[in-house]
Every structure is written in C-alpha cells, then in structure tokens.
Image (cartoon, rainbow, N blue to C red):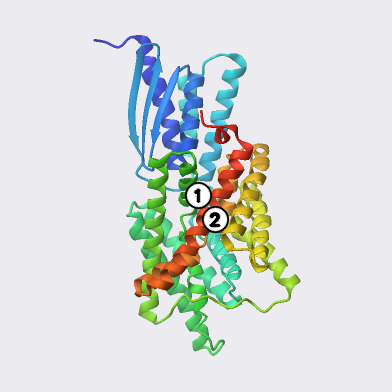
Amino acid sequence: MEPTDDELELIRQSGVALRVGRLSLSAGTGSYRVKASMARIARALGIERHHAHVTLTEITTTSHRGRSFRTEVTEVRSIGINADRLSELEKLVSEVDETHLKTGEHAQVDTINAALDRIAARPALYPALLNALWSSIACAAFAFLNNGGLIEVVGVFFGAGLGQLVRRAMLHRGYNQFGVTMIAATVACLVYLGFVQSLAGLGLTESHHQAGYVSAVLFLIPGFALVTGALDLAKLDFSAGVARLVYALMLLTSAALAVWAVSVAVGLAPDPVAPIGLSPVVLLVLRFVASFFGVLGFALMFNSPWRMAVAAATVGMIANVIRIELVDVGVVAQAAAAGATLLVGLMAAWVAPRLRVPRITVSVPAVVIMVPGVAAYRAVFQLSNGNTTQALAFGVQAGLVVISISIGLAAARMLTDKAWAFER
C-alpha cells in the first residue's frame, strides 16, 4: 500500500526532528536537552506527539499525527564536545519554536534542513595548534591550583599541549577513544617529566618536581560526560545517565592507568603536595587569575566562541575561588563543591539567556575545574599498586565531590526551571 501525501510529509518531518537530536547528541549535550530540542522542532513542524528514548550513542523516536506514526532509530558513534554547535542548534530551535508560537504557522522541512546543513558543515573554530594551546593554559592553571610552582606550571603547559595535539589528531582519524586517551596521557606525562629532567640535567633545579605530572593529564577529564550523566540521573533518565557515567569512568580509568604505568616506569608517585608559601593576598589574586584562565582554556578547548568562553570563565572564577576559600577555612570539600556549583548554576541561569546560548555551555566548563581529577588519578594509581586503603580514601573523596557538584547544578536547575522542579 502506497503511503499518502500526509504520511510522506510525516516521514520527512520525523527525519528532521531526529536529525536535530543526532546533531545535539554528537555535540555532547545531555539526553534531557536532546529530547527537549527534538520535541520543540517536532511541535513547530506540526507533529502532534513526539516521543524519544535517548542513550549515550542511540536515539529512538516515534512521531504521531492523527492515525499515522513514524518510528526511527539512529546511532552516534563519535562522542565529543562542540559548544559552538550546541549554541547554533539552540538558536535554531528557539527561533523556529518562537516563530511557530507567534504566528501559528508550521515550519518548513526544507528550511530547517538547510539550516542544519549549515550547522553540520561549520568547521571547528580553532585549528589544532590553538586547541592544544587552550589545553595547555587550562592544565597549567590547574597545576597552580593544585599547589604547583613555576616549574610545574611550565612543564604542565608543554605536556598538556602536546598530549592534546596527539589526542585530537588521532581522534580525527577515527582511532578508539580509550586507546587514544591512554596514548595522550602517556605523551603528556613523558613530556612533563622530560622537561623537568632536562632542567635537572642543566643544574637549574635539584628536585624532580613530580607533583605536576598528574596535572598534565587533566585535559582528559571527561567533565561534560560526568556532569551531563549526573543531570540525566537527576531527571530520572537512568539509561542515559548510567551510560554516560560508565563512559566517563572508562575514560578516566584509561588515563589513570597510563599515568600509573609511567609512574611505575620512572619510579614516581602522585602524592599530595604542600601548599605554596605565598602571602594570603597574593595567593588570592593568583587563584582568581588561575581559575579564570583554567575555565577559559577548557571552554575554548570545547570549541566555545570567545563570548561564551569568557562568560563561563567569569562564572567559574568567582565560584571556584569561593570553593577553595571555603575549604581553607575548614568546610568539607563536598559541601564547598555543592555550594560553589549551586552558585554556578544560578549565575549561568542569568547569563546564558542573555547570551542566547544553552545553559550547559556556561555551567559545565565553569565546574570542570572543580572536578577532582587528581584525586581520581591517585585512587587508580594506589589501587594498581595494591594499596587498597589509600585507593578507597582517594576514590571516596573524588566520588563525593562529583556527586556534590551534580547536586549543586541540579538544585540550581530546580530553582530556575519549572521543567526540573516539577515532574509531569
């Protein structure tokens, strides 16, 4: 039986809604945002009901109009972060939805497809060398915030930059993500240690400065996956949330095992470092500077436009310094993290609509710098060495902070978004 013209039109409309979801999912956003974007486009196209099931790599949708329905499935094999694409998709979805609500006219399939073609064809905002530079800046800032000195900061700058350069080149050639993560972590560690050893060979330093080499791999922290996975769980989307958290854990473990292998080969250990001996005022100023550039580096590495990246950096700088100061006066790390991320979520709720960008593109880079990557790496290192008690201590510490980060962001969404505050 031949499909009617109305059924053919439903097929085309369903395909466009699914394409919006696929582009959103491949850009790294959470499943709740993917579903919302598809639903708004479907409504604007004239689809009466639209249901979607979204996981980390798959989308299943069913579109209804009258007695007709269309079910489609798509798969996303390339998982990454592209904040610029998320922003462009959010603008498109908002414009189409607002026009439909104002005029009552349905959007045209060809018009939306043309806009999606343009968004999909947009190249990365920054070439490989600039992308590596953003990684260098972010991790160098991390090194200072983790009590590293000048030598650690410079060594991490070189190690993280070359590691990200290798990582990006291999991912663009389609290599397995977990294998690429291990290789990039190894490169970053070896470059850092090679830099420090060169200084020691020239007589410029007497210390191995081993504390910094863990900071050199912090560009591999799957911050987006950790945060979006936890937010998916907060929305009771367990299939997507659990998948994202498992994916993040596998990436983190891959990087940590590479760090452990390098540590064993060269006889080093990522032990905690004593605080830097600076005056309180100087230390506070440097923490503001390091927090700003740390978040800025991560935001730019996620392919954020400059305006979006500066907004995220400003929000993250304020919240992260407050978090650090709270810990210094005796507040437990997880409570400080929850309070700081609640502040991030509230500020992002005010900033993002004014920039007309998705809230996640401001809030996630701002909290990535709070993710306890060093503690997580130390947990895997100690576990690999058979030191179960120490591994549990570091692992529990890291886990509690990540949970607290998620609670803070989820609480902010509930306070500022009715769709999160009430289950319908």
Q: Residues within 10 Å of mark 1 (few under 14, many from 20)?
A: many
Instruction: Give the crowd class for mark 2: few <14, some 14-19, many >=20 residues within 10 Å.
Output: many
| SS at mark 2 in the image | helix
**Could you tell me how many numbered marks the image carries?**
2
Which residue reaches farthest left? Answer: 1
Q: Residue furthest right?
A: 281
Q: CA distance from mark 1 to mark 2?
A: 8 Å
Q: Quadrant of residue 388?
A: bottom left
Task: Examine the rendered structure and indicate whether residue 135 appears above or below residue 158.
Answer: above
Task: Kindly identify the amino acid type of the residue bearing the numbered disc 2.
Answer: Val
Horizontal side of 92 relative to 350 (left or right) equals left
The percent coordinates of residue 305 (x first, y second) are 59, 46
Q: Which one is in front in this view, the residue at disc 1 or the one at disc 2?
A: 1
Q: Is residue 337 left or right of residue 424?
A: right
Q: Amino acid at mark 1?
A: Val
Q: Position of residue 226 (x, y in %)?
A: 47, 51
The percent position of residue 55, horizontal first and vertical second, equals 38, 40
Q: Does residue 191 sit above or below 49 in this rendering?
A: below
Q: Would you say 57 lies left or right of 81 here?
A: left
* Disc 2: which residue: 368
Pick the front one: 312 or 302? 312
Q: Secondary structure at mark 1?
A: helix
Residue positioned 59% across, 78% down in the render: 274
Contact flag, marks 1 and 2 (Cβ < 8 Å): yes
Query: On the rendered structure, is 281 left or right of 127?
Result: right
What residue do we see at 56% from left, 24% from top? 97
Residue 205: x, y in percent? 56, 87
Residue under the point 39% across and 81% down: 266
Q: Which residue is mark 1?
A: 227
Residue 416, visible in the rendered structure? yes
